[in-house]
Amino acid sequence: MKKRFKKFIKNHWLFVLFLVSYSTALFYKVIAHPTPFYDWDESLYIQTGLEMFKRRFFLFPLWQGKIWFDKPPLVPFLYALVTKVFFFIAPEISTRLFTIVIALIILTFVYAIYNRIIKNSFLTTLITLLTAVVPIFLQRAQVVNLDSFLLLGWLGYLLFMDNFWWGLFFLFVAVFSKSLIGFYPVSIFTGYYFYLYFKKEIGFKKLKSVLVKIFVQSSILLSWFILMYLKFGQIFWKMQIVESHFRRVTASIEFHFGEHLFYINLVRDQLGIFFYLSLLGVLIISVQYLQGKLSAKNIFYGLYLLPWFIFLNATKTKIFWYLFATIPQFAFLTFYPLVFLKNKKVLFTLLTAMLMIIVLYQTILKQKLFTTFYSQYDSYYDLAITTKKNCDSLTLLIDKKTRGDFATLDRMGLLITTTKWWGNHPAIVYYSGKPTDFIFDKQEFINKMPNLTKDSCLAASDEDLNFSRQSLKLLGKFGQIRLLKKI
């Protein structure tokens, strides 16, 4: 074991050095400068996971006692588990450290996958480095999210598919983090082995054994969806399948609009000048394959994530973090042309080192790695903390502009069942720890006031507080929002 470890370090020392440096930098940043959970996804996943434990219900995440059928339970469960196991560490630190660990495993998988093709530690480390420092990857590596687990599952399945149980484990991670999208490797592997069969590179016996393995793995995981449909019926089908999958493909639901070239423009912005090198990489790989210089296996490994990017461009709903899973793909394509220089060791080493310096310069200085944070203490955080200390519950009237935006989306048929569950600041629920009712209609808000019990609170913007405040005590003003308590 000791000899194998020494051999690994000797052969992959640059990657190990990078991984240690990268993890040290992110660990330090998260520990030294803790910030509140990001207002949307972070607070939402932590809150839903904690409610699962509180109510001893683990089939789905829960939001203020309601079943959130949109998402499988794995990721909220894991994050909540981290907060409970490491109860002596602030959740804003422990959960983000956990996310960084997941990111480090992803980067290790990226290195392992592309090193199988390129077989050069320096070049594969450069590919992994670019993956790690692209802004979207950096952001996802430091915040509570689902996407890291999805990519972990996809890459893990690619690496360990030959082992039934490890393959099943990573497919489980992908599916139970992001639902049916997690089955992406199944479709890719199925297509790949059919291709090998029709090209007569494998026989029917091999094809059958692979398809049976994939079928059994998929059936085990699909059984959960069948059981949930049998237990919960149409509401499960509507929220988990129709709204969370098909509607995102066919409509720009909620506020996720974007032009047709949204993802192409986004990856160009994320990679900068490296984007154009990635196009060159696509061209070179295509030519090499047509010339018979690349095997189908190398093409499969090298372009494993490309179909996902192509699919994204066909969807109507545009969300920037969907691009996250394609970042390793573009990093690989960016530096693939350097394989032609592998045998010219001096030139290859100098060019690789220069590119590493450029990437690090852009990350540390231009992107301001150590001073860029994804959340901050704001007036809504202060509102939530004051509510926690003084109120039994909170009724919050959404601001006028947001109410108008939601009304427009409603008229266009672009809302889903859970759209209004979160209000426009779901972190209030987590940080207040009190039942919170988000109201999207002013008259409804006024009608609720007489029914408020003693010590319950309400909040609204100044422009909406043009009514009698009798029996209400002002607790504070937070930006444009006033917090009032029933006395």
Image (tube, rainbow, N blue to C red):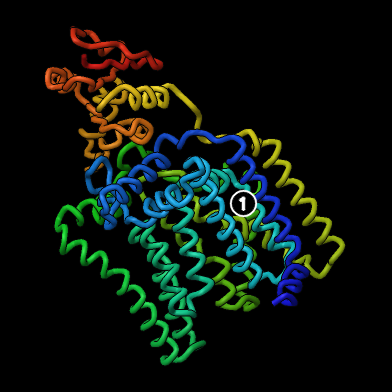
Does residue 473 sit above or below 293 in this rendering?
Answer: above
Does residue 132 sit above or below 191 in this rendering?
Answer: above
Residue 340 percent coordinates (x, y)? 75, 67
Left or right: 77 as drawn, with respect to 6: left
Question: Which quadrant of the figure has residue 15?
Answer: bottom right
Residue 221 percent coordinates (x, y)? 32, 69
Residue 133 percent coordinates (x, y)? 63, 47
Q: Residue furthest right?
A: 346
Circle 1 sits in a helix, a strand or a loop, which is it? Answer: helix
Marker count (numbered) = 1
Query: From where the camera sits, is residue 265 visible?
Result: no
Left or right: 156 as drawn, with respect to 226: right
Assign the C terminus to one quadrant of the image. top left
How many residues crowd mark 1 within 10 Å: few (<14), some (14–19), many (20+)? Answer: many
Q: For this rendering, which residue is in front, 387 or 186?
A: 387
Q: For this rendering, which residue is in front, 192 or 37?
A: 37
Residue at x 30% of width, y 46% of height: 51
Q: Amino acid at mark 1?
A: Ala
Does residue 279 sit above or below 373 in this rendering?
Answer: below
Q: For this rendering, which residue is in front, 460 or 96?
A: 96
Left or right: 469 as drawn, with respect to 125: left
Residue at x 37% of width, y 26% of height: 384
Residue 162 percent coordinates (x, y)? 49, 80
Question: Which quadrant of the figure has residue 394?
Answer: top left
Name the residue carrying label 1: 132
Query: From where the camera sits, is residue 7 visible?
Result: yes
Assign the N terminus to one quadrant of the image. bottom right
Residue at x 62% of width, y 78% of height: 292
